[in-house]
Image (spheres, rainbow, N blue to C red):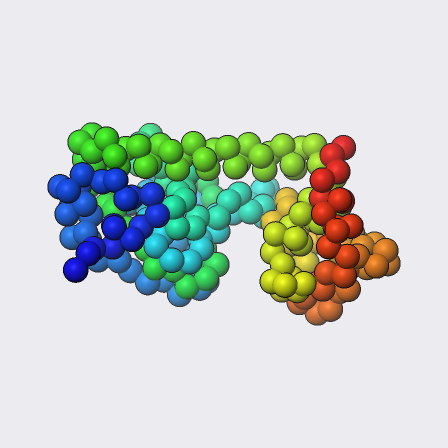
């Protein structure tokens, strides 16, 4: 019977010895809403997400949160990688957004595999590079894209069919804005006929117009 590493996204080319060392670890299950790390914590190990989604947030001095990125199968956590390789403590907070099945690779094993396994090292650095690229895109959007455009993009990205089940605060966190600002922009979109707002849900009525708005740059 194959181990978890053979079914993990991005780990299909591991050396047999590396795979055996990883498969000796037992995956864990974390219910939705479980804290994974907090600011000031040190990285204890490298998490490989097998199923589900972990969201990583940064909280500013004002208490406002911004969603930095989400870790899904095949992805990685920049802060964890920096913590394990550079000794940096976490500056953000991570919480499971869904039920998550994951494998935790302890620090000592992670560092050993980085030294001895080219395939594992390649996986870590490739995932790290993709995550950094995503964070640069986030910085670009927050710095140069209008709130309306960021909100439109977030609605399209989060839509299940035509329904976006999220509070105004959750949408604000996703785009790096304030809840009051998002509420005003949603009201404007509703008056324009692009969406309908209900408690805890936004219904998309004109996806094409939202997509055009999402593409607008300042």
Residue 61 lies in quadrant? top right
> What residue appears at the point 46 percent right and 62 percent down from the top-left corner?
98
Q: Is residue 87 visible?
A: no
Left or right, residue 96 beside residue 68 = left
Q: Is residue 104 visible?
A: yes
Q: Position of residue 80 (x, y in %)?
A: 37, 40
Q: Position of residue 51 (x, y in %)?
A: 38, 58
> What residue appears at the point 23 percent right and 31 percent down from the top-left corner?
118
Relative to 52, say whether 146 is above or below. Answer: above
Q: Position of residue 2 (x, y in %)?
A: 19, 56
Quarter of the image with the N terminus is bottom left
Quarter of the image with the C terminus is top right
Tally of numbered tags:
0
Q: Position of residue 4 (x, y in %)?
A: 25, 55
Q: Which residue extends farthest right? A: 191
> What residue appears at the point 64 percent right and 50 percent down from the top-left corner?
154
> What residue appears at the point 58 percent right and 42 percent down from the top-left corner?
60
Left or right, residue 174 beside residue 83 = right
Residue 193 lies in quadrant? bottom right
Left or right, residue 48 beside residue 98 = left
Relative to 160, say whether 128 is above or below. Answer: above
Q: Which residue extends farthest bottom? A: 199
């Amino acid at each position: 019977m194959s181990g978890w590493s053979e079914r993990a996204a991005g780990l299909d080319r591991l050396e047999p010895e590396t795979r055996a060392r990883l498969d000796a670890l037992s995956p864990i299950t974390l219910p939705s809403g479980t804290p994974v790390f907090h600011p000031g914590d040190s990285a204890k190990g490298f998490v490989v997400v097998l199923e589900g989604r972990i969201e990583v947030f940064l909280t500013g001095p004002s208490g406002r949160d911004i969603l930095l990125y989400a870790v899904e199968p095949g992805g990685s956590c920049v802060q964890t990688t920096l913590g394990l390789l550079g000794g940096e403590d976490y500056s953000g907070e991570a919480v499971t957004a869904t039920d998550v099945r994951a494998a935790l690779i302890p620090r000592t094993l992670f560092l050993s595999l980085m030294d001895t396994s080219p395939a594992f090292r390649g996986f870590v650095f490739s995932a790290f590079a993709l995550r950094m690229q995503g964070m640069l895109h986030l910085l670009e959007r927050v710095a140069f894209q209008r709130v309306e455009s960021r909100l439109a993009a977030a609605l399209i990205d989060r839509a299940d069919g035509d329904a976006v089940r999220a509070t105004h605060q959750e949408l604000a966190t996703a785009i790096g804005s304030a809840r009051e600002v998002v509420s005003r922009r949603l009201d404007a979109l509703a008056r324009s006929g692009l969406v309908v707002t209900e408690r805890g849900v936004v219904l998309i009525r004109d996806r094409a117009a939202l997509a055009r708005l999402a593409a607008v740059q300042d």
